[in-house]
Image (cartoon, grey):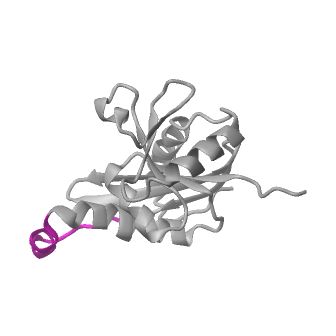
Amino acid sequence: MATTPVHLGFLTVFQEGTGWLGAYFVTNAWGRPLDFRLSSAVQPNKIQNILYGGTLLPYLCGDLIGKALVDKASIGVQLVVTTCEHALDLRRKLEIPVVHLVAAEEARATSPLAIPLKNGKGFLTCHAGFPSDMAAVTGLLAELEGNLDFTEPFTRIRDGVSEARKMGVGNRQAA
């Protein structure tokens, strides 16, 4: 019986100046690159800040930036891991789990929706609106058998973003 290869998405969204940028990196189960995407800067105006209020950042990070990057990727994934808590709202737009990578030393990682990583480097926290994702994520982690350090791809993303800026690159696919 053939099994579907596991592909993982790593999403980061960060503020730079007054704008927000995102990067999305797709790997296989061993961490080999399959796709890499960068967003354009999104700069909310004062009216948007007022009208969206406390929902602005989840909208920008999850709905606007995160969803666009995932949709443009050439490869589907079974799990999206993000370092941006606001991007967890991307889960409302996808049929797959989206988890927030929380550092081991953060106290809120004791949430009932937090799954500890075997390497001790943190927790994966599921979206509060999708508690059933815990079983799917736990199953996927067991399938991966600890082969992947979930923190390491974010180092490659930061380096990739830095290099893309030097090259003046917008959206690019991994080689």
Tell me which residue sits at (21%, 65%) in the image.
55
Q: Is residue 99 above or below residue 142?
A: below
Residue under the point 49% across and 38% down: 155
Q: Over which residues does the magenta segment extend?
A: 41-53
Is 91 magenta? The answer is no
Q: Is residue 39 visible?
A: no
Q: Main secondary structure of the magenta part?
A: helix
Question: Percent position (x, y) of residue 159?
Answer: 49, 42
Q: Quadrant of residue 113?
A: top left
User: Relative to 114, does residue 55 appear above or below in the rendering?
Assistant: below
Q: Nearer the viewer, residue 82 or 93?
A: 93
User: Which quarter of the rendered picture does the N terminus lie within?
Assistant: bottom right
Where residue 92 sits: x, y (%)? Answer: 41, 67
Looking at this view, is 28 or 40 the one in front?
28
- Does the image show residue 102? yes
Q: Is residue 105 above or below residue 79?
A: above
Q: Judge left or right: residue 36 versus residue 54.
A: right
Please give the name of the residue rendered at 22% of the width and 65% of the height, measured from the top-left corner: 56
Identify whether 75 is placed above or below 113.
Answer: below
* x, y percent for residue 124: 46, 41
Is 170 situated left or right of 26 in this image?
Answer: left
Q: Residue at x 66, y 42 (%)?
A: 31
Q: Quadrant of residue 72?
A: bottom right
Residue 29, percent from left and from top? 70, 45
Along the line of sight, which residue is nearer the eye, 62 or 139?
Answer: 139
Residue located farthest toward the right when viewing the structure as drawn: 1
Residue 145, quarter of picture: top right
Q: Quadrant of the C terminus?
A: bottom right
> In the image, 75: left or right of 153?
right
